[in-house]
Image (spheres, coloured by chain):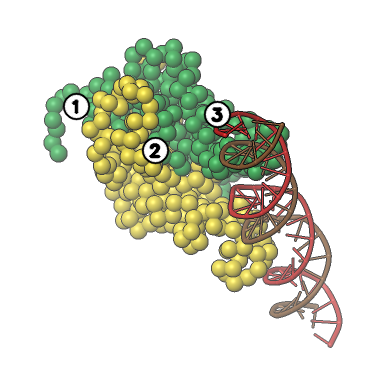
Chain colours: A green, B yellow, C red, D brown
Amino acid sequence: MAIADEKGLAAVSMRAVAQRVGVTPMALYPHVGSKAALLDLMVGRLLSMLGEDPAMRAAADADWRTRLRVFASSARLGLQTHPWATGLLFDRPTVTPEAVAVIDKIYSALLDAGVPGREVPRVERLVSTFVLGYVASEVGGRFGPGELDPRGRRGQLPEGALPAHARVAEALDAPVDWDEEFKQGFEEVLRLVESVAAGSRGGARAR
Amino acid sequence: MAIADEKGLAAVSMRAVAQRVGVTPMALYPHVGSKAALLDLMVGRLLSMLGEDPAMRAAADADWRTRLRVFASSARLGLQTHPWATGLLFDRPTVTPEAVAVIDKIYSALLDAGVPGREVPRVERLVSTFVLGYVASEVGGRFGPGELDPRGRRGQLPEGALPAHARVAEALDAPVDWDEEFKQGFEEVLRLVESVAAGSRGGARAR
DNA sequence: CGTATAGATCTACACTGTATATACATGAGC
DNA sequence: GCTCATGTATATACAGTGTAGATCTATACG
Protein backbone atom coordinates (compact mmCIF):
# COMPACT_ATOMS: atom_id res chain seq x y z
CA MET A 1 0.00 0.00 0.00
CA ALA A 2 2.90 2.34 0.71
CA ILE A 3 4.32 1.65 -2.74
CA ALA A 4 0.94 2.22 -4.37
CA ASP A 5 0.45 5.48 -2.46
CA GLU A 6 3.87 6.74 -3.41
CA LYS A 7 4.28 5.61 -6.99
CA GLY A 8 0.93 4.39 -8.18
CA LEU A 9 -0.64 0.96 -8.52
CA ALA A 10 1.43 0.16 -11.59
CA ALA A 11 4.57 0.33 -9.44
CA VAL A 12 3.27 -2.45 -7.20
CA SER A 13 5.15 -5.38 -8.69
CA MET A 14 6.00 -8.52 -6.81
CA ARG A 15 9.65 -7.57 -7.20
CA ALA A 16 9.10 -4.09 -5.78
CA VAL A 17 7.14 -5.41 -2.81
CA ALA A 18 9.76 -8.07 -2.16
CA GLN A 19 12.54 -5.52 -2.19
CA ARG A 20 10.57 -3.32 0.22
CA VAL A 21 10.25 -6.12 2.74
CA GLY A 22 13.83 -7.23 2.13
CA VAL A 23 13.23 -10.59 0.55
CA THR A 24 13.35 -12.21 -2.87
CA PRO A 25 10.22 -11.97 -5.04
CA MET A 26 9.28 -15.61 -4.85
CA ALA A 27 9.37 -15.57 -1.07
CA LEU A 28 6.10 -13.62 -1.13
CA TYR A 29 4.11 -16.40 -2.71
CA PRO A 30 3.65 -18.69 0.29
CA HIS A 31 2.29 -15.63 2.14
CA VAL A 32 0.05 -13.87 -0.34
CA GLY A 33 -0.69 -16.57 -2.89
CA SER A 34 -0.59 -14.45 -6.01
CA LYS A 35 -0.56 -10.89 -7.17
CA ALA A 36 -4.34 -10.82 -7.52
CA ALA A 37 -4.66 -12.06 -3.95
CA LEU A 38 -2.24 -9.37 -2.82
CA LEU A 39 -4.46 -6.71 -4.40
CA ASP A 40 -7.46 -8.27 -2.66
CA LEU A 41 -5.62 -7.98 0.63
CA MET A 42 -4.87 -4.33 -0.06
CA VAL A 43 -8.53 -3.57 -0.76
CA GLY A 44 -9.61 -5.51 2.31
CA ARG A 45 -7.21 -3.60 4.48
CA LEU A 46 -8.42 -0.28 3.16
CA LEU A 47 -12.05 -1.25 3.71
CA SER A 48 -11.35 -2.31 7.28
CA MET A 49 -9.59 1.01 7.85
CA LEU A 50 -12.77 2.68 6.64
CA GLY A 51 -14.90 0.50 8.90
CA GLU A 52 -12.78 1.43 11.92
CA ASP A 53 -12.43 5.08 10.95
CA PRO A 54 -12.61 7.20 14.13
CA ALA A 55 -15.04 9.59 12.44
CA MET A 56 -17.39 6.72 11.65
CA ARG A 57 -17.09 5.29 15.16
CA ALA A 58 -17.85 8.70 16.63
CA ALA A 59 -20.97 9.03 14.50
CA ALA A 60 -22.15 5.48 15.15
CA ASP A 61 -25.08 6.64 17.27
CA ALA A 62 -26.00 9.73 15.28
CA ASP A 63 -29.08 9.98 13.07
CA TRP A 64 -29.05 8.20 9.74
CA ARG A 65 -28.32 11.31 7.69
CA THR A 66 -25.20 12.12 9.68
CA ARG A 67 -24.05 8.52 9.50
CA LEU A 68 -24.38 8.47 5.74
CA ARG A 69 -22.65 11.86 5.42
CA VAL A 70 -19.77 10.65 7.55
CA PHE A 71 -19.56 7.49 5.50
CA ALA A 72 -19.44 9.46 2.27
CA SER A 73 -16.78 11.90 3.36
CA SER A 74 -14.67 9.25 5.07
CA ALA A 75 -14.80 7.05 1.99
CA ARG A 76 -13.95 9.99 -0.23
CA LEU A 77 -11.03 11.00 1.96
CA GLY A 78 -9.73 7.45 2.11
CA LEU A 79 -9.93 7.02 -1.64
CA GLN A 80 -8.26 10.35 -2.25
CA THR A 81 -5.42 9.28 0.02
CA HIS A 82 -5.22 5.87 -1.66
CA PRO A 83 -6.32 6.53 -5.24
CA TRP A 84 -5.12 3.14 -6.46
CA ALA A 85 -8.10 1.52 -4.74
CA THR A 86 -10.85 3.06 -6.85
CA GLY A 87 -10.18 0.95 -9.90
CA LEU A 88 -9.88 -2.19 -7.83
CA LEU A 89 -13.20 -1.61 -6.07
CA PHE A 90 -15.12 -1.75 -9.33
CA ASP A 91 -13.50 -5.06 -10.25
CA ARG A 92 -14.11 -7.08 -7.13
CA PRO A 93 -17.40 -8.35 -5.75
CA THR A 94 -18.11 -6.76 -2.39
CA VAL A 95 -18.26 -10.04 -0.52
CA THR A 96 -15.21 -9.96 1.73
CA PRO A 97 -15.85 -9.68 5.47
CA GLU A 98 -14.42 -6.15 5.45
CA ALA A 99 -16.74 -5.07 2.64
CA VAL A 100 -19.91 -6.53 4.12
CA ALA A 101 -19.07 -4.93 7.46
CA VAL A 102 -19.06 -1.50 5.81
CA ILE A 103 -22.19 -2.27 3.81
CA ASP A 104 -23.98 -3.35 6.98
CA LYS A 105 -23.52 0.14 8.39
CA ILE A 106 -25.10 1.62 5.27
CA TYR A 107 -27.98 -0.86 5.40
CA SER A 108 -28.57 0.15 8.97
CA ALA A 109 -28.69 3.85 8.11
CA LEU A 110 -31.08 3.21 5.22
CA LEU A 111 -33.38 1.15 7.44
CA ASP A 112 -33.40 3.97 9.98
CA ALA A 113 -34.27 6.35 7.16
CA GLY A 114 -37.39 4.31 6.55
CA VAL A 115 -36.32 2.65 3.32
CA PRO A 116 -38.27 -0.61 3.13
CA GLY A 117 -36.06 -3.67 3.65
CA ARG A 118 -36.91 -4.93 0.17
CA GLU A 119 -35.37 -1.77 -1.31
CA VAL A 120 -32.37 -1.44 0.97
CA PRO A 121 -29.79 -3.37 -1.08
CA ARG A 122 -30.78 -1.51 -4.22
CA VAL A 123 -30.55 1.90 -2.58
CA GLU A 124 -27.24 0.97 -0.98
CA ARG A 125 -25.87 0.16 -4.41
CA LEU A 126 -27.14 3.48 -5.67
CA VAL A 127 -25.61 5.49 -2.83
CA SER A 128 -22.25 3.78 -2.80
CA THR A 129 -22.07 3.88 -6.59
CA PHE A 130 -22.47 7.64 -6.45
CA VAL A 131 -19.67 7.96 -3.91
CA LEU A 132 -17.33 5.53 -5.63
CA GLY A 133 -18.09 6.82 -9.11
CA TYR A 134 -17.66 10.42 -8.13
CA VAL A 135 -14.34 9.87 -6.35
CA ALA A 136 -13.08 7.58 -9.12
CA SER A 137 -13.79 10.40 -11.56
CA GLU A 138 -11.98 12.90 -9.37
CA VAL A 139 -8.84 10.89 -8.70
CA GLY A 140 -8.79 9.16 -12.08
CA GLY A 141 -8.87 12.47 -13.89
CA ARG A 142 -12.24 12.22 -15.66
CA PHE A 143 -13.27 15.52 -14.08
CA GLY A 144 -9.86 16.98 -14.80
CA PRO A 145 -9.11 19.72 -17.29
CA GLY A 146 -6.99 17.75 -19.74
CA GLU A 147 -4.51 19.65 -21.83
CA LEU A 148 -6.89 22.31 -23.09
CA ASP A 149 -8.74 24.96 -21.12
CA PRO A 150 -12.53 25.05 -21.54
CA ARG A 151 -12.37 27.70 -24.26
CA GLY A 152 -9.86 25.75 -26.36
CA ARG A 153 -11.91 22.62 -25.89
CA ARG A 154 -14.95 24.23 -27.49
CA GLY A 155 -12.78 25.43 -30.36
CA GLN A 156 -12.02 21.89 -31.47
CA LEU A 157 -15.37 21.52 -33.16
CA PRO A 158 -16.92 23.58 -35.94
CA GLU A 159 -18.80 26.73 -34.99
CA GLY A 160 -22.25 25.99 -33.62
CA ALA A 161 -21.58 22.30 -33.08
CA LEU A 162 -21.98 22.69 -29.32
CA PRO A 163 -25.05 24.87 -28.84
CA ALA A 164 -25.66 23.85 -25.24
CA HIS A 165 -22.06 24.50 -24.28
CA ALA A 166 -22.48 28.02 -25.55
CA ARG A 167 -25.49 28.53 -23.29
CA VAL A 168 -23.57 27.45 -20.16
CA ALA A 169 -20.23 28.95 -21.13
CA GLU A 170 -19.90 31.14 -18.06
CA ALA A 171 -20.39 28.16 -15.74
CA LEU A 172 -17.76 26.21 -17.69
CA ASP A 173 -15.18 28.94 -17.33
CA ALA A 174 -15.75 29.25 -13.58
CA PRO A 175 -13.48 27.19 -11.29
CA VAL A 176 -15.11 24.27 -9.47
CA ASP A 177 -15.00 23.64 -5.74
CA TRP A 178 -14.99 19.87 -5.81
CA ASP A 179 -15.47 19.44 -2.07
CA GLU A 180 -18.57 21.60 -2.27
CA GLU A 181 -19.88 19.85 -5.37
CA PHE A 182 -19.47 16.43 -3.81
CA LYS A 183 -21.25 17.60 -0.67
CA GLN A 184 -24.07 19.12 -2.65
CA GLY A 185 -24.47 16.06 -4.85
CA PHE A 186 -24.56 13.83 -1.80
CA GLU A 187 -27.24 15.98 -0.17
CA GLU A 188 -29.32 15.46 -3.28
CA VAL A 189 -28.71 11.74 -3.03
CA LEU A 190 -29.90 11.90 0.57
CA ARG A 191 -33.11 13.56 -0.60
CA LEU A 192 -33.46 10.75 -3.12
CA VAL A 193 -33.18 8.26 -0.24
CA GLU A 194 -35.82 10.19 1.66
CA SER A 195 -38.16 10.10 -1.29
CA VAL A 196 -37.82 6.33 -1.55
CA ALA A 197 -38.63 6.08 2.15
CA ALA A 198 -41.54 8.51 1.84
CA GLY A 199 -42.88 6.62 -1.17
CA SER A 200 -43.16 3.49 0.91
CA ARG A 201 -44.81 5.33 3.80
CA GLY A 202 -47.41 6.73 1.42
CA GLY A 203 -48.71 3.23 0.85
CA ALA A 204 -48.75 1.07 -2.25
CA ARG A 205 -48.50 2.82 -5.59
CA ALA A 206 -49.58 1.90 -9.08
CA ARG A 207 -47.32 -0.73 -10.68
CA MET B 1 -11.50 -2.82 -30.20
CA ALA B 2 -12.25 -6.23 -31.64
CA ILE B 3 -9.42 -7.73 -29.61
CA ALA B 4 -10.62 -5.97 -26.44
CA ASP B 5 -14.18 -7.15 -27.02
CA GLU B 6 -13.08 -10.73 -27.60
CA LYS B 7 -10.31 -11.23 -25.09
CA GLY B 8 -10.36 -8.28 -22.73
CA LEU B 9 -8.38 -5.09 -22.51
CA ALA B 10 -5.34 -6.89 -21.13
CA ALA B 11 -5.07 -8.77 -24.43
CA VAL B 12 -4.68 -5.52 -26.34
CA SER B 13 -0.92 -5.46 -26.72
CA MET B 14 0.90 -3.67 -29.47
CA ARG B 15 2.07 -7.05 -30.69
CA ALA B 16 -1.47 -8.45 -30.75
CA VAL B 17 -2.84 -5.44 -32.61
CA ALA B 18 0.04 -5.57 -35.08
CA GLN B 19 -0.57 -9.23 -35.78
CA ARG B 20 -4.28 -8.52 -36.30
CA VAL B 21 -3.58 -5.91 -38.96
CA GLY B 22 -0.80 -8.02 -40.47
CA VAL B 23 2.17 -5.88 -39.66
CA THR B 24 5.09 -5.80 -37.23
CA PRO B 25 4.55 -4.18 -33.83
CA MET B 26 6.74 -1.16 -34.43
CA ALA B 27 4.90 -0.30 -37.62
CA LEU B 28 1.98 0.88 -35.50
CA TYR B 29 3.89 3.69 -33.88
CA PRO B 30 3.91 6.19 -36.74
CA HIS B 31 0.13 5.77 -36.88
CA VAL B 32 -1.04 5.71 -33.27
CA GLY B 33 1.87 7.29 -31.44
CA SER B 34 1.88 5.12 -28.35
CA LYS B 35 -0.20 2.57 -26.55
CA ALA B 36 -1.83 5.25 -24.39
CA ALA B 37 -2.79 7.16 -27.53
CA LEU B 38 -4.21 3.97 -29.01
CA LEU B 39 -6.44 3.57 -25.96
CA ASP B 40 -7.51 7.20 -26.33
CA LEU B 41 -8.47 6.47 -29.93
CA MET B 42 -10.50 3.47 -28.82
CA VAL B 43 -12.40 5.55 -26.27
CA GLY B 44 -12.97 8.30 -28.80
CA ARG B 45 -14.33 5.89 -31.33
CA LEU B 46 -16.73 4.39 -28.81
CA LEU B 47 -17.94 7.82 -27.76
CA SER B 48 -18.55 8.85 -31.32
CA MET B 49 -20.47 5.61 -31.87
CA LEU B 50 -22.61 6.63 -28.91
CA GLY B 51 -23.07 10.13 -30.32
CA GLU B 52 -24.25 8.72 -33.62
CA ASP B 53 -26.32 5.94 -32.10
CA PRO B 54 -29.54 5.53 -34.14
CA ALA B 55 -31.61 5.44 -30.95
CA MET B 56 -30.18 8.77 -29.87
CA ARG B 57 -30.69 10.31 -33.30
CA ALA B 58 -34.27 9.10 -33.34
CA ALA B 59 -34.94 10.68 -29.94
CA ALA B 60 -33.17 13.94 -30.79
CA ASP B 61 -36.41 15.92 -30.85
CA ALA B 62 -38.16 14.17 -27.98
CA ASP B 63 -38.71 15.74 -24.56
CA TRP B 64 -35.73 16.02 -22.22
CA ARG B 65 -36.72 13.02 -20.10
CA THR B 66 -36.85 10.70 -23.07
CA ARG B 67 -33.55 12.06 -24.37
CA LEU B 68 -31.83 11.37 -21.06
CA ARG B 69 -33.40 7.92 -20.82
CA VAL B 70 -32.21 7.06 -24.30
CA PHE B 71 -28.76 8.38 -23.48
CA ALA B 72 -28.60 6.26 -20.32
CA SER B 73 -29.73 3.05 -21.93
CA SER B 74 -27.60 3.55 -25.05
CA ALA B 75 -24.54 4.26 -22.95
CA ARG B 76 -25.24 1.24 -20.77
CA LEU B 77 -25.70 -1.00 -23.78
CA GLY B 78 -22.54 0.29 -25.40
CA LEU B 79 -20.50 -0.24 -22.28
CA GLN B 80 -21.91 -3.70 -21.77
CA THR B 81 -20.92 -4.56 -25.32
CA HIS B 82 -17.47 -3.02 -24.84
CA PRO B 83 -16.74 -3.49 -21.14
CA TRP B 84 -13.07 -2.57 -21.53
CA ALA B 85 -14.07 1.07 -21.91
CA THR B 86 -15.47 1.63 -18.44
CA GLY B 87 -12.11 1.68 -16.70
CA LEU B 88 -10.64 3.94 -19.36
CA LEU B 89 -13.46 6.47 -19.09
CA PHE B 90 -12.65 7.17 -15.45
CA ASP B 91 -9.01 7.81 -16.27
CA ARG B 92 -9.31 10.30 -19.09
CA PRO B 93 -10.56 13.86 -18.96
CA THR B 94 -13.70 14.23 -21.05
CA VAL B 95 -12.22 16.83 -23.35
CA THR B 96 -11.97 15.07 -26.68
CA PRO B 97 -14.27 16.30 -29.46
CA GLU B 98 -16.23 13.05 -29.26
CA ALA B 99 -16.74 13.41 -25.52
CA VAL B 100 -17.86 17.03 -25.57
CA ALA B 101 -20.27 16.25 -28.40
CA VAL B 102 -22.01 13.69 -26.18
CA ILE B 103 -21.91 15.98 -23.17
CA ASP B 104 -23.49 18.76 -25.20
CA LYS B 105 -26.55 16.61 -25.75
CA ILE B 106 -26.87 16.09 -22.01
CA TYR B 107 -26.42 19.79 -21.33
CA SER B 108 -29.18 20.49 -23.80
CA ALA B 109 -31.55 18.06 -22.09
CA LEU B 110 -30.78 19.50 -18.67
CA LEU B 111 -31.40 23.05 -19.91
CA ASP B 112 -34.73 21.93 -21.34
CA ALA B 113 -35.52 20.39 -17.97
CA GLY B 114 -35.15 23.82 -16.44
CA VAL B 115 -31.86 23.28 -14.67
CA PRO B 116 -30.23 26.71 -14.37
CA GLY B 117 -27.20 27.14 -16.63
CA ARG B 118 -24.98 27.67 -13.61
CA GLU B 119 -25.88 24.19 -12.34
CA VAL B 120 -25.86 22.32 -15.64
CA PRO B 121 -22.22 21.10 -15.65
CA ARG B 122 -22.53 19.91 -12.06
CA VAL B 123 -25.76 18.01 -12.72
CA GLU B 124 -24.31 16.54 -15.90
CA ARG B 125 -21.41 15.16 -13.89
CA LEU B 126 -23.86 13.72 -11.40
CA VAL B 127 -26.02 12.05 -14.02
CA SER B 128 -23.20 10.63 -16.10
CA THR B 129 -21.35 9.49 -12.99
CA PHE B 130 -24.41 7.49 -12.00
CA VAL B 131 -24.59 5.83 -15.42
CA LEU B 132 -20.86 5.20 -15.69
CA GLY B 133 -20.47 4.09 -12.08
CA TYR B 134 -23.42 1.76 -12.23
CA VAL B 135 -22.35 0.09 -15.46
CA ALA B 136 -18.72 -0.10 -14.33
CA SER B 137 -19.95 -1.95 -11.24
CA GLU B 138 -22.03 -4.29 -13.36
CA VAL B 139 -19.42 -5.19 -15.92
CA GLY B 140 -16.47 -4.99 -13.54
CA GLY B 141 -18.08 -7.45 -11.17
CA ARG B 142 -18.59 -5.24 -8.12
CA PHE B 143 -22.27 -6.16 -8.12
CA GLY B 144 -21.42 -9.78 -8.82
CA PRO B 145 -21.90 -12.65 -6.42
CA GLY B 146 -18.26 -13.61 -5.88
CA GLU B 147 -17.52 -17.16 -4.86
CA LEU B 148 -19.98 -17.34 -2.00
CA ASP B 149 -23.75 -17.16 -2.09
CA PRO B 150 -25.38 -14.50 0.11
CA ARG B 151 -25.93 -16.92 2.97
CA GLY B 152 -22.31 -18.07 3.06
CA ARG B 153 -21.17 -14.46 2.90
CA ARG B 154 -22.99 -13.61 6.08
CA GLY B 155 -21.51 -16.68 7.75
CA GLN B 156 -17.97 -15.32 7.42
CA LEU B 157 -18.40 -13.02 10.38
CA PRO B 158 -19.30 -13.87 13.98
CA GLU B 159 -22.95 -14.20 14.87
CA GLY B 160 -24.69 -10.86 15.21
CA ALA B 161 -21.90 -8.90 13.52
CA LEU B 162 -24.19 -7.92 10.67
CA PRO B 163 -27.45 -6.87 12.29
CA ALA B 164 -28.71 -4.89 9.32
CA HIS B 165 -28.01 -7.75 6.91
CA ALA B 166 -30.20 -9.93 9.06
CA ARG B 167 -33.06 -7.46 8.73
CA VAL B 168 -32.92 -7.47 4.93
CA ALA B 169 -32.01 -11.12 4.49
CA GLU B 170 -34.98 -11.96 2.29
CA ALA B 171 -34.11 -9.17 -0.15
CA LEU B 172 -30.51 -10.38 -0.30
CA ASP B 173 -31.52 -13.91 -1.17
CA ALA B 174 -33.82 -12.77 -3.97
CA PRO B 175 -32.39 -12.59 -7.49
CA VAL B 176 -31.85 -9.11 -8.95
CA ASP B 177 -33.18 -7.88 -12.28
CA TRP B 178 -30.32 -5.53 -13.17
CA ASP B 179 -32.07 -3.99 -16.16
CA GLU B 180 -34.99 -3.09 -13.95
CA GLU B 181 -32.79 -1.79 -11.14
CA PHE B 182 -30.84 0.44 -13.49
CA LYS B 183 -34.04 1.79 -14.98
CA GLN B 184 -35.51 2.44 -11.57
CA GLY B 185 -32.36 4.11 -10.28
CA PHE B 186 -32.24 6.31 -13.34
CA GLU B 187 -35.87 7.36 -12.87
CA GLU B 188 -34.91 8.47 -9.39
CA VAL B 189 -31.98 10.39 -10.82
CA LEU B 190 -34.41 12.06 -13.21
CA ARG B 191 -36.55 13.11 -10.25
CA LEU B 192 -33.41 14.51 -8.68
CA VAL B 193 -32.83 16.56 -11.83
CA GLU B 194 -36.42 17.79 -11.65
CA SER B 195 -35.98 18.85 -8.07
CA VAL B 196 -32.90 20.89 -8.97
CA ALA B 197 -34.90 22.55 -11.72
CA ALA B 198 -37.88 23.12 -9.41
CA GLY B 199 -35.62 24.54 -6.71
CA SER B 200 -34.44 27.22 -9.10
CA ARG B 201 -37.99 28.04 -10.23
CA GLY B 202 -39.05 28.45 -6.62
CA GLY B 203 -36.68 31.39 -6.27
CA ALA B 204 -33.72 31.80 -3.94
CA ARG B 205 -33.69 29.60 -0.88
CA ALA B 206 -32.15 29.94 2.53
CA ARG B 207 -28.63 28.54 2.26
C1' DC C 1 17.27 8.44 -63.56
C1' DG C 2 18.44 9.70 -58.84
C1' DT C 3 16.92 10.92 -54.54
C1' DA C 4 14.04 12.32 -50.61
C1' DT C 5 10.76 10.66 -47.51
C1' DA C 6 7.47 7.99 -45.18
C1' DG C 7 6.62 3.75 -43.65
C1' DA C 8 7.93 -1.01 -42.18
C1' DT C 9 11.23 -4.00 -39.97
C1' DC C 10 14.68 -6.00 -36.72
C1' DT C 11 17.03 -6.11 -32.62
C1' DA C 12 17.56 -5.04 -27.97
C1' DC C 13 16.45 -3.44 -23.17
C1' DA C 14 14.35 -3.31 -18.93
C1' DC C 15 10.40 -4.78 -17.12
C1' DT C 16 6.19 -8.13 -15.64
C1' DG C 17 4.03 -12.61 -12.99
C1' DT C 18 5.13 -16.98 -11.71
C1' DA C 19 6.47 -22.35 -12.59
C1' DT C 20 10.01 -25.16 -11.18
C1' DA C 21 13.79 -26.99 -8.69
C1' DT C 22 16.83 -26.40 -4.97
C1' DA C 23 18.52 -25.10 -0.39
C1' DC C 24 17.81 -24.25 4.49
C1' DA C 25 16.10 -23.83 9.12
C1' DT C 26 13.04 -25.30 12.61
C1' DG C 27 10.36 -28.43 15.48
C1' DA C 28 8.38 -33.43 16.46
C1' DG C 29 8.95 -38.18 17.54
C1' DC C 30 11.89 -41.73 18.93
C1' DG D 1 21.24 -36.88 19.67
C1' DC D 2 19.23 -38.32 15.43
C1' DT D 3 16.06 -38.52 11.65
C1' DC D 4 12.63 -36.64 9.08
C1' DA D 5 8.82 -33.64 7.69
C1' DT D 6 7.31 -29.11 6.91
C1' DG D 7 7.32 -24.35 5.79
C1' DT D 8 9.95 -20.66 4.05
C1' DA D 9 13.58 -18.52 1.05
C1' DT D 10 16.24 -18.61 -3.08
C1' DA D 11 17.89 -18.98 -7.99
C1' DT D 12 16.85 -19.69 -12.50
C1' DA D 13 13.98 -19.60 -16.41
C1' DC D 14 10.03 -18.59 -19.59
C1' DA D 15 6.85 -16.09 -22.11
C1' DG D 16 5.11 -11.89 -22.24
C1' DT D 17 5.03 -6.28 -22.08
C1' DG D 18 6.06 -1.17 -24.31
C1' DT D 19 9.15 1.06 -27.04
C1' DA D 20 14.05 3.24 -28.21
C1' DG D 21 17.26 2.99 -31.95
C1' DA D 22 19.17 1.56 -36.24
C1' DT D 23 18.25 -0.26 -40.66
C1' DC D 24 15.83 -1.47 -44.74
C1' DT D 25 12.39 -0.64 -48.55
C1' DA D 26 9.00 1.18 -51.58
C1' DT D 27 6.80 5.00 -53.37
C1' DA D 28 6.52 9.93 -55.26
C1' DC D 29 8.79 13.85 -57.30
C1' DG D 30 12.18 16.96 -59.73
Q: Would you say residue B11 is visible in this rendering? A: yes
| Residue D19, placed above or below residue B69 | below
3 and 2 marks in contact (CB < 8 Å): no
| Residue B34, placed above or below residue A184 | below
Identity of the residue drawn at 57% across and 27% down: A81
Mark 2: give few (<14), some (14-19) or many (20+) Cα within 10 Å. Answer: many
Image quadrant holding the C terminus of chain A, namely top left
Q: Quadrant of the rendered structure where residue B54 is? A: bottom left
> To which residue does mark 2 refer?
B130
Report how far apart the C-alphas of labels 1 and 3 lie in the structure. 36 Å
1 and 2 marks in contact (CB < 8 Å): no
In the image: residue A15, left or right of residue B60: right
Identity of the residue drawn at 59% across and 68% down: B19
Q: Earlier in the sequence, mark 1 or mark 3?
A: 3
- In front of the other: label 3 or label 2? 3
**Which kind of residue does numbered mark 3 sit on?**
Gln
**Where in the figure is residue B185, as x and y percent of width and height?**
30, 37
**Where in the figure is residue D30, as x and y percent of width and height?**
80, 78
Q: Quadrant of the rendered structure where residue A70 is? A: top left
Label 3 secondary element: helix
Chain identifier of the residue bearing label 2 in the image: B
Report how far apart the C-alphas of labels 1 and 2 lie in the structure. 23 Å
> To which residue does mark 3 refer?
A80
Mark 3: give few (<14), some (14-19) or many (20+) Cα within 10 Å. Answer: some
> To which residue does mark 1 refer?
A200
1 and 3 marks in contact (CB < 8 Å): no
